[in-house]
Image (cartoon, helix red, strand yellow):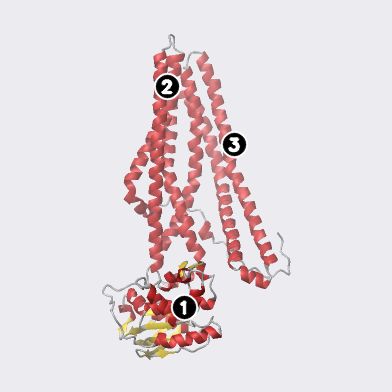
Amino acid sequence: VSLDKGRPPRAVVGSQVSHDEEMFGAAFDGKVLRRFFTYVRPYKHRIYIALFSVLVFTGAQLAIPLVIRYAIDEALMAQGGSETILQLAMVAFGVIILINYGVSYTQDLLVGLTGENAIFDLRRAMFVHLQSVGLSFMDKTEIGRMMSRLQGDVNSLQEFLENSITAIGDLVLLVGIVIIMLALDFWLGLLTLSVVPVLFFVRLVWLPRARIAFRTARETNSSANGALAEGIHAVRTVQGLGREVVNFDLFTEKAAENLRSHLRSAKFAQAMVPIVDTLTGIAMGIIVVVGGTLVLDNALDVGVMVAFLFYVQRFFDPIRSLTLQYSVMQRAMASGQRIFEVLEVPIVIADKPKAIIPDRIKGEISFEGVTFGYARNQIVLKDITFNVRPGETVALVGPTGSGKTSITALLHRFYEVWEGSIKIDGVDLRDHAKAALGRHIAMVLQDPFLFTGTILENIRYRTSSASRADVERAATVVGAHDFIERLPNGYDTRLEQQGRNLSMGQRQLLSFARALVANTKILILDEATANIDSYTEQQIQIALKRLLRGRTGIV
């Protein structure tokens, strides 16, 4: 779709694709496999049983043509053929089918359970780690990319685990068919297998082009999803600016590109199917012509020729499957690299071995020669020194970008200072345990975040031991009780995502109530009344006097 010159500039998050995020990885990465199998190791006994089941299943698959060959040559074609032999063959055939069912079910069940458990452990490890890394890492990382690693990349590893056991069975089946065919009739086996080099040559030509097509499809898929997600999240802004038509054109362009790339990848994905079918037909033709001639010359048993036909039919299935597994492995290696990159992000803000957790604090705050910035060439605070006495309220005043929010973030130790120190009650912040900061410091931000759940659960989010009476008392103090009671279910009203079913002022009142229930000695208000109307702000000012009484406050 061509764009008009007068079209407004693009503004679609996700329109630029990170090739680092979408590229296929190497077909084999020992480091990734070793790291991943640390999560599989607790369930290794299941894997051993599943592997044994796969080998039994493969052995049964190899035995079926031999049973058929035995029945034909010994019961049907032999002079004075024995009905007993035919019945034995039928019993053997039935036993093999039952074995196949049992081991196939066991394999699928155990591999599925192992995959789900290992991925559950991996997701938990990633979540715990992401909760512990510094905000400096999260500031530089797109949330969408993190979600992709927690979901899509982890699923790729699960797919690899579940398919790798099957791939082992395919390899054993492939080798077993070759050995049996050569053992039954060496020259007919060689002649039948002469089509295999053609398949490998075709695969060498097909694979590089297919990889590019598959990668492009994944990239354009991410681009289209990004455009769609932005359009949904920013629907109010889009409608307010009247960009519906422009955004529709942009999305249509990306969706059309995604369609073209998926059609191309589908063509490559299906290209191997007729090739394999053709080679299978050629191999079967060789068996019928050459094998039939040998049968007529009494140089080959009919049962052997029939067994050859069955083996050739099965021979190309594992090749087709292993070709697909190669792409699965590539994706898994790339996904594993990205996952373990996250798990290797250093935790720069960690408790010291003997970090203190005081039961009570006075609330004295001291900044002594603090220098800090978000980048080495971008200093936000330089040699800042001030002191806040216990119970005192201090207002930070300055233009946008002067470092007011940075001071509050440093006090909560979201970031480390470059130079100088921050002390609470004369003790360096770095000597306090992070849990102690959460216990003694409450923060109310300009944009309050409410979680999916009831109002009651949100107000006591950080203080789960608070009673309903404590919650109602806090809500009454900050002026939130009346509007809560007017809601359909009062304190048990469920909030939508981020509390969207409440006004901004109501959300802010709930965040004040949450801070009051926490009953901390230090209270930080980071432009907490910026999004509140004048009437509600009057209520808040009255509540703040009560809230800050006996507490150290930074506003």
**Can residue 402 be seen?**
no
Task: Identify the residue at the far left of this view.
Answer: 354
Label 2, residues with CA under 10 Å away: few <14, some 14-19, many ≥20: some
Answer left or right for 487 relative to 95.
right
| Label 2–label 1 contact, CB within 8 A | no
Tags 2 and 3 touching, CB below 8 Å: no
Q: Which mark is residue 468?
A: none
**Residue under circle 3?**
274
Q: Distance between the residues labelled 2 and 1?
A: 79 Å
- Callout 3, which amino acid? Pro
Q: Which of marks 2 and 1 is nearer the N terminus?
A: 2
Q: Distance between the residues labelled 1 and 3?
A: 70 Å
Q: Nearer the viewer, mark 2 or mark 1?
A: 1
Three-letter amino acid code at disc 1? His
Q: Tell me the number on the disc at residue 481.
A: 1
Residue 343, percent from left and from top: 40, 62
- Give the image location of residue 416, x and y in percent: 39, 78
Is residue 101 toward the left or the right of residue 275 in the image? left
Looking at marks 2 and 3 on the same chain, the residue that comes earlier in the sequence is marked by 2
- Secondary structure under badge 1? helix
User: Is 225 in front, or is 416?
Assistant: 225
Residue 298 screen position, x and y as percent: 48, 13
What secondary structure is found at the residue carrying circle 2?
helix
Q: Name the residue under label 2.
A: 90
Q: Quadrant of residue 108?
A: top left
Give above or below for 209 relative to 524. above
Residue contact at pointers 1 and 3, CB within 8 angstroms: no
Residue type at the position of mark 2: Met
Front residue of 55/120: it is 120
